[in-house]
Image: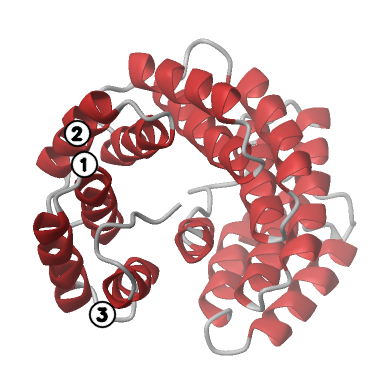
Amino acid sequence: MKPILLAALLIAAPATFAQSGSGATYDPSLDRKRYEGCVRAIPTDAAKAEQFALEWQGMGGGLPARHCQALAQLHREQFAAAASTLVKAAQAAEAEKSPLAADFWGQAGNAAVLAGDSKGAIGYFTTAITQAGEFAPQRSANLLVDRARAQTELNNIPAARADIDKALTLNRDDPIAWMLSAALARREKDMARATQEISRASTLAPTDPDIMFEQGNIAAANGDAEAARKVWEMTVKSAPGTPAADMAAKALAAKPADPAP
């Protein structure tokens, strides 16, 4: 799932920033243009974009400058550094009482997962959930799903189950949450639930390669090797180059009745 998290983070830039600026010659009204230009530069030259973000911070760039720096680090796969930058942004946002604090904590959590620090990520997600509060149910649901991913990385299945179940009470229309719930049910040996929930996920997002891959896993776990083979072949054909297609190809090369862990 790590490439999925990276893609999500790279497009998760908040839409706007408020920045007061403290330098006498610094014009904070240009921050939005600076931010947009910095983010646009990342695919072409992430190192240069990061350097610009650091210089911008020195002038008083604050939150948008830190966020562009983190996105550049993510693009360069410097995941631990990106997590650290996002934590600093989250702390600054908290100090400014900015509503962006929850977003930054959540993104820090995802960067930590990418860095292999799932334990640290859980702490960041927990803070993000607290910051999001009770009045943003969809945001809270997304953060609970993210924390469940981190719990699963640590094989803490009961905690992951609790988070996914709560997320689904807040947002019943998230296909990824249904897929993760189905995958957890498969690991819990509750195949009736796994089958029902992967069907719900597939109905909501029939062409999602990760959902298709998990369909194959559940079919294999149910002893239907032929159905597993067909859906894995479809995953490889319809989503070449994706992590799901790569995993499906590996599953096809192994015993077809053996689901992925």
Q: Which amino acid does label 2 sit on?
A: Thr
Is disc 1 in contact with disc 2, using a CB cutoff of under 8 Å? yes
Q: In front: 197, or 65? A: 197
Q: How far apart are marks 2 and 3 (CA)?
A: 25 Å
Q: Is residue 126 above or below residue 162?
A: below
State which mark lies toward you, 2 or 3. Answer: 2
Instruction: Indicate the secondary structure of the residue bearing disc 1.
Output: loop
Q: In the drawing, does residue 152 fall left or right of residue 79?
A: left
The answer to which quarter of the image holds residue 154 is top right
N-term mark: 3 or 1: 1
Q: Position of residue 83 (x, y in %)?
A: 75, 54
State which mark lies toward you, 3 or 1. Answer: 1
Q: Which amino acid does label 1 sit on?
A: Asn
Category of crowding for the residue at label 1, using alpha-carbon neighbours closer than 10 angstroms: few (below 14), some (14–19), many (at least 20): many
Can you identify the residue that label 3 sits on? 240
The answer to which quarter of the image holds residue 61 is bottom right
